Amino acid sequence: MTTMTRWSLSLALVLSVGVGMAQAQEVGTLVGFGAYGHGQINVPTGNFKAIAAGGYHSIAIREDGTLVGWGDNTDGQINVPAGAFKAVATSDYYSYYSLGIREDGTLVGWGNNDYGQINVPAGTFKAVAAGGYHGLAIREDGTLVGWGGNDYGQINVPTGTFKAIDAGLLHSIGIREDGTIAGWGFGIGFGPIPTGTFTAIDAGGYHSLAIREVVLNVNDPPVCSLGQPTPASLWPPTHTLASVGIVGVADPDNDQITITVTGVTQDEPVNGLGDGDTSPDAVLQGSTALLRAERSGTGNGRVYQLTFTAGDNQGGSCIGRVKVQVPHSRRGTAVEDGQLYDSTLP
């Protein structure tokens, strides 16, 4: 094979929506930039949904799924096959070949085949990568398969299931389903594979890159709907103020909770007619409220509604409401007639 000096080649998909990926469904027009000695940046017109840049050639998937290739054609690397495709990969290490996944999930390869790199395996696949002289793919069940050159074990794929792969010049890398990275082939022993979980990888000639997963500290707020008043009933109606608190509010993360009573309303006038009727009927006291044990002697009992907030020490909060009754009789139950009055007013 003729040895050539490597030059930079870049392609971009100018999308009408979003950002293009190897298997993206967004579409847009193409732009090429960098070295142009072989026509590799003389991009075709039309809308495209995926691109791949090789050493001196380029491949793209049109909006309708068909392929187009342009640039150097030393080994037939731009003689693209017919049919509709959902993914494409091409080697950018001057081994002049490309790989693609058809819409039905089967693989196809074309171009140089000095190391069997286009002798693709049978089956259906969901991802493909083209290395220096070897190919990699993820089967529908998440397992890996490799083919082509294997001087350094670059196609000796590990067991397990994977969600992403890439192929370098003589090495391979993948992201397992749990987000950890596996690597095999030449140069993997030059440095330790990073620990942790990752969302994207890319294999260069002799190095690799990965994007770490950012784990956000998601805080669940307290659950105010679990709140209950204590006590829930005031008796006897002595016209005095009684302390009422709120219990039962829980935090899913077991964070410390602070409860604040922010308002009290009632269904009877605050200062109605009758002997001993006094006001105000409620006093806010932070996590509790003082409620007047009082109701109209001619009514059907009084119902107070306490509005409260519950906040945890991580910034989460909720708003809740509980009701406290002053029944008309000792064994009775108050009937609510609508929360019409602010209990804290005179």
Image (tube, rainbow, N blue to C red):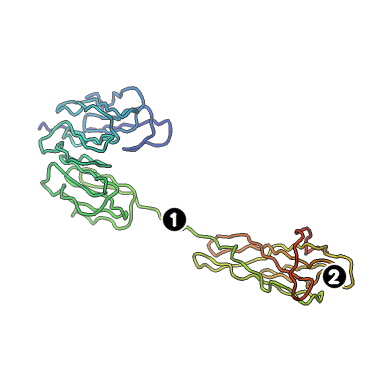
Q: Residue at x 60, y 64 (%)?
A: 310
Q: Which of 214/66 is in front?
A: 66
The CA distance from mark 1 to mark 2 is 57 Å
The first of marks 1 and 2 along the sequence is 1
Q: Quadrant of residue 266?
A: bottom right
Q: Quadrant of residue 315?
A: bottom right
Q: Position of residue 19 (x, y in %)?
A: 39, 37
- Please say if 300 is above or below 68: below
Instruction: Describe residue 87's horizontal placement relative to residue 327 as left or right.
Output: left
User: Mark 2 highlights which residue?
Assistant: 297
Residue in view at x 85 percent, y 68 percent: 298
Please name the amino acid that badge 2 sits on: Gly
Label 2 Cα neighbours within 10 Å, binned few <14 / some 14-19 / many ≥20? few
Q: Which residue is mark 1?
A: 216
Camera-nearest residue between 182 and 49: 49
Locate the C terminus by quadrant: bottom right
Q: Secondary structure at mark 2?
A: loop
